[in-house]
Image: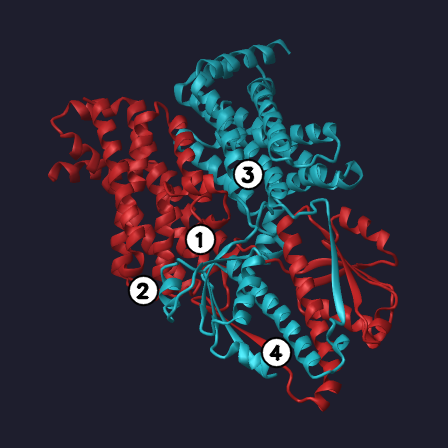
Chain colours: A red, B cyan
Amino acid sequence: MNRILMLARKEFIQLKRDKRMIPLVFIAPLLQLILFGYVVQTEIKDIGMVLVDGDRTAESRVMAERFVNTGYFTITGRADAESQIAGHIRAEKATIGVVIPEGFEKNVRNGRTAEVMLVIDGSDSNAGVQAQQFATRIIAARSQELMGERLASVRAIAPKISSVEPRVRVWYNPELKSVNFMIPGLMGLIITIITTIVTSLAIVKERENGTLEQLIVTPIKRWELISGKILPFVVIAFIEIGLVLVVALGWFGVPFRGNILLLLALCVAFLFTTVGQGLFVSTVSRTQSQALLTAWFFMMPAMMLSGFIFPIANMPAVIQWFTYAVPLRYFLVIVRGIFLKGVGMSALWDEVLMLSLLGILIFSVSVLRFRKRYR
Amino acid sequence: MKMIKAIAAKEFIHIIRDPRTLGIILILPLFQLLMFGYALSLDIDSIPTAVYDRDRTATSRKLIESFSSSGYFNITARPVQADFAERLDDGRIKVAIVIPEGFAEDLLSDKRTRVQVIVDGSDPTLARVGVGYSSAIIGRFSSKATAESLYRRGLDVTRSAAPVQTSSRVWYNPELRSVNFIVPGLMALILMTVTTITISLAVVREKEKGTLENLIISPIKSWELILGKIAPYVVIAFLEALLITATGMLWFNVPMNGSFILLLMSMTIYVAGTLGLGLVISAATDSQQVASFGAFMATFLPSFLLSGFVFPIKSMPFVLQLLTYIVPARYFLVVIRGIFLKGTGFDILWPDLLALVVFAALMLTIASVRLRRAFA
């Protein structure tokens, strides 16, 4: 035990001496918190819109106003003909063109069906989908309103007409705030970066300098060596978990509804997988640049295939299988569940089981490889 | 010129001697492109949904059918009791639909009725789709019910036709496939990270070994040294760009509507800038560990988050929007997406290309000055 502590102390001193490492280890996560807290949202505001009002009546103006009033669209240009829309879209000035054709008001008033035409720039598929959804919803809402006016005359005769009212309620995050989704997830990402990348770099650095061999010829046992090397980064990881918690609750106002002890306990389970990856990377790399690229190889999938931003359910089946091997996938369900839903072990047991299995597997394979290399 | 060639030849030998790194440089990006081209989709469909049907009539089944046939909802559970709260808690379902008892009877007897929809809001993107489409589906079902109700009473059914209808056309990417949007973006991201990281590591490695000093005291000029160092990586970056472009077009069927020459030209400008950035990083750092971290921080994060790669710039807070102007990927994304999807040319893209030229010139100048000063 004493030896482990000595090694850990040595590691801390080395970290402290590398003046640029400490800011990177602590400033990078803070920066990520700010970026992910403010940047990562896919909702689009102020969509640029070209209006072609071929009708120029009271009714068509009401329709156009509805687009602006919702706050989703900003009119960036007006055109006289549909053919002019292309110019605005190609020059990136507008994402959507809205055409209200001549005769719009007449059709609406005479009980016929009038048409509003949308021309959408699909090159940014995300913006395109949202523009289409918002526009369709705005037009449908106006249509419903006009329908109400039409039916009002009927209702005078028949007061009862059947209809279905949707009552939609959103649980856990009623305002649909992106931060509530991103910030808890970020905890998993930061742990992965710190423990996988920094651990592997620290070990490979010693190998490059030849000091690892010196440690190995001392009477220190392999497991003591490994624990001593890992311990400082686990401590740092926990400091950062605390940091994320403080910023999440204090600054971003993310609700925390679950049990904090459960969360910390499960962080330990997750750490086994990430530290194991770091150890593994260090056994297969000779230089720091190789270690970084290989760690990268673990990090990118962790980020992209974990459901951190992109929903797993949308991925093709083959890629979904891959996601089962990504530990972060399970940790994200756990951390988001504890934060937002306040769930306990009963709802999380299958994720906890998978995470523990992966942790034992990755960690023991890495330790075995590490020991074999330094026999 | 001979000097530059000699340095370039030396650098090539270094690269070839380390085939593993070369392999990683060429294969890893391809792997990433393939993986993420498939994985990074923001299109949401098949939301796991539970239906608690308390009515169990033909009418309620019809409503459920319109949910499942829409493609947005995948009905994975039909509980017989109200335990959907647990299912939402453990994440097995994201949407729960509750159809009340007497649903069909109410509609037949010309009454108003309600359908309850509960959406898991913890993932806002998914929740937005769930809220939007469930309201739309119920709305459509409702207007059909209204029409039937009017018909039963012998009233004018045409009055129930929608007063305003939408018809939409989507240009450049008619199916709104997010692959067409993501793959060109990935090109920008991958090109930048790989080139910046590899060149900064290559220079810092020489610094660490002390071989850079040998070069500095030789009669070589610093700009010659820089050009010679960069040249092999330009070649590699070019190969990589071609590889990625070919994969995007042939494998993912991303349409290429613009000029190929303009594409290659802008890629060259972009890569010159990213390599310059790599040199600046290597001039400021002494260890590979710090250089790699610095390169990661300077390339991946801003290019991923602040470039408009997936997260719309317009939705960011004002200060961060200002910050995006110094992210080169921001400009390159406009260029590459414009060329690929819209077939836009120089007449529209010149401001963004100009920004890239400025970035490249700035980076290469700073690198040249700083490297010279470091060894003066």
Which chain does tag 4 point to?
Answer: A
Mark 3–mark 2 distance (CA, rounded to whole Å):
36 Å
Mark 4–mark 2 distance (CA, rounded to whole Å):
40 Å
Q: Are marks 4 and 1 in contact (CB under 8 Å)?
A: no
Residue bearing mark 4 = A163
Comparing B214 with B195, the one in front is: B195
Give the percent coordinates (x, y) of residue A70.
67, 69
Residue bearing mark 2 = A258
Asked which secondary structure carries label 4, the reply is strand
Mark 4 crowd level (few <14, some 14–19, many ≥20, 10 Å Cα): many
Residue bearing mark 3 = B37
Q: Amino acid at mark 3?
A: Gly
In the shown orientation, is residue B86 left or right of residue A116?
left
Rendering quarter of residue B138: bottom right
Specify the quadrant that holds the N terminus of chain B.
Answer: top right
Asked which secondary structure carries label 2, the reply is loop
Of callouts 2 and 1, the N-terminal one = 1
Mark 3 crowd level (few <14, some 14–19, many ≥20, 10 Å Cα): many
Q: What residue is rendered at 50% in x and 64% in y?
A: A176
Give the percent coordinates (x, y) of residue B38.
53, 40
Label 2 and label 1 in one chain? yes
Mark 4–mark 1 distance (CA, rounded to whole Å):
47 Å
Q: Nearer the viewer, mark 4 or mark 2?
A: 4
Q: Nearer the viewer, mark 4 or mark 3?
A: 4
